[in-house]
Amino acid sequence: MRCLANYEAANKNLERARGRNKDIPKAETEQQEACKKFEDISALAKTELKDLKKRRVLAFKKNLADLADLEIKHAKVGEFSSISFYPNTSSRNK
């Protein structure tokens, strides 16, 4: 966040320098440096977000499989029991 604020401040300073027609090269170099730092941070943040998304998807898949296993385990009454996934559907349609 700080790099973004520095980049925005450098852009404002460059516009002010152009308006006054004074110290333009200095303001341009500061703006370019701030832009490069921001882009470097942005690239790092993108890789971190992709890694986070990958970890969350894997954790979700694992938890979903565990939940399904538990539901199947608790739904078994006997060896040949029939499981009704939609109980009382005929009474809802009335």
Image (tube, helix red, strand yellow):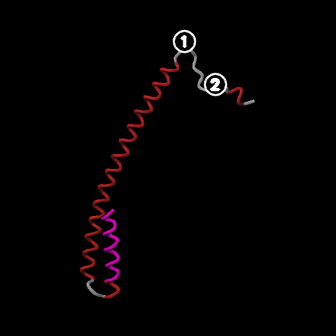
Q: Position of residue 62 (x, y in %)?
A: 40, 33
Q: Is residue 8 above or below residue 72?
A: below
Circle 2 residue: 87
Circle 1 residue: 80
As drawn, the residue found furthest toward the top would be: 79
- How packed mark 2 is, by other alpha carbons closer than 10 Å (few <14, some 14-19, many 20 or more), is few
Amino acid type at mark 1: Phe
Query: Which quadrant is home to the C terminus?
Result: top right
Q: Position of residue 92 (x, y in %)?
A: 70, 30
Let me know if residue 15 is in the magenta part. Answer: yes
Report the mark closest to the observer, 1 or 2: 2
Is there a contact, CB below 8 Å, between mark 1 and mark 2? no
Magenta stretch bounds:
1-16
Amino acid type at mark 2: Pro
The residue depicted at 52 percent of the width and 17 percent of the height is 76
Q: Position of residue 45 (x, y in %)?
A: 32, 55
